[in-house]
Image (tube, rainbow, N blue to C red):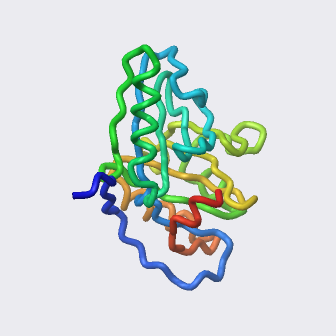
């Protein structure tokens, strides 16, 4: 039996031919960990409200005081978990690491019009001055609690939206509906997309 987390997406999208720059991709296959410590902990160096790439973990998101979301490539094997366990053990404080891969949904919204689309569903100022690349926040998107991470992809504005598994299909459908005026299309998500971000 493999130790790799299993990801079964709760989102059913049909990928079409890409003829537009604004796309939505199901990224639920990414390995997801929740790391929690005391509110003033700096066990993972990424501060609250920011997201940073870590060479052996992937994308580390400061999602709350003493709370992090770690996203790793689906083919990363046991490496990220082993590194998180090593960091937790060496921290000198109580740190919990919980693997969430199968229990959470994640989509990537990519394209120049992505902020305009999100503005229809979310009341946060998405301007570069307020939410630059690497910004992370938790807000209501289409009336569901969603972690939003600005994670530009190849120089193109991009957002990762992370929510409860049971809300994943609803979130994807709301994004597609709101994106109709921008000619949004469904795109495939592959591990190579993740590694180049």
Q: Which of the image's four quarters has the N terminus?
A: bottom left
Instruction: Please tell me whether residue 3 is drawn above or below residue 44 in the rendered image.
Output: below
Q: What residue lies at 51% left-to-right and 68% top-to-bottom? A: 189
Residue drawn at (36%, 70%), measured in percent from left and top? 12
Q: Residue furthest bottom?
A: 17
Which is nearer the eye, 155 or 75? 75
Q: Position of residue 136 (x, y in %)?
A: 59, 38
* Residue located at (51% from left, 23% from top): 43
Q: Residue placed at 58% from the left, 65% from the top?
A: 193
Q: Position of residue 132 (x, y in %)?
A: 72, 42
Single out the residue that lies furthest toward the right: 129
- Quarter occupied by residue 111: bottom right
Q: Is residue 63 above or below residue 66?
A: below
Q: Is residue 149 above or below residue 154?
A: above
Residue 136 drawn above or below residue 115: above
- What percent of the width, then of the height, locates residue 182? 64, 70
Is 41 on the left-hand or right-hand side of 170? right
Q: Residue furthest left?
A: 1
Q: Nearer the viewer, residue 130 or 85?
A: 85
């Amino acid at each position: 039996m493999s130790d790799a987390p299993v990801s079964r997406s709760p989102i059913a999208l049909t990928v079409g031919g890409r003829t537009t720059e604004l796309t939505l991709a199901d990224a639920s296959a990414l390995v997801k960990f929740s790391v929690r410590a005391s509110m003033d902990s700096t066990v993972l160096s990424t501060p609250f409200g920011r997201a940073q790439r870590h060479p052996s973990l992937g994308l580390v998101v400061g999602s709350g005081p003493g709370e992090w979301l770690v996203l790793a490539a689906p083919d990363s094997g046991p490496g990220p978990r082993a590194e998180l366990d090593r960091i937790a053990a060496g921290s000198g404080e109580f740190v919990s690491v919980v693997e969430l891969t199968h229990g959470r949904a994640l989509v990537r919204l990519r394209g120049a019009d992505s902020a305009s689309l999100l503005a229809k569903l979310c009341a946060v100022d998405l301007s570069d001055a307020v939410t630059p690349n690497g910004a992370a926040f938790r807000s209501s998107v289409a009336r569901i609690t969603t972690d939003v991470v600005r994670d530009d992809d190849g120089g193109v504005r991009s957002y990762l939206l992370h929510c409860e598994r049971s809300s994943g299909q609803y979130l994807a459908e709301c994004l597609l509906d709101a994106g109709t005026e921008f000619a949004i299309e469904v795109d495939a998500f592959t591990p190579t997309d993740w590694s180049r971000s």
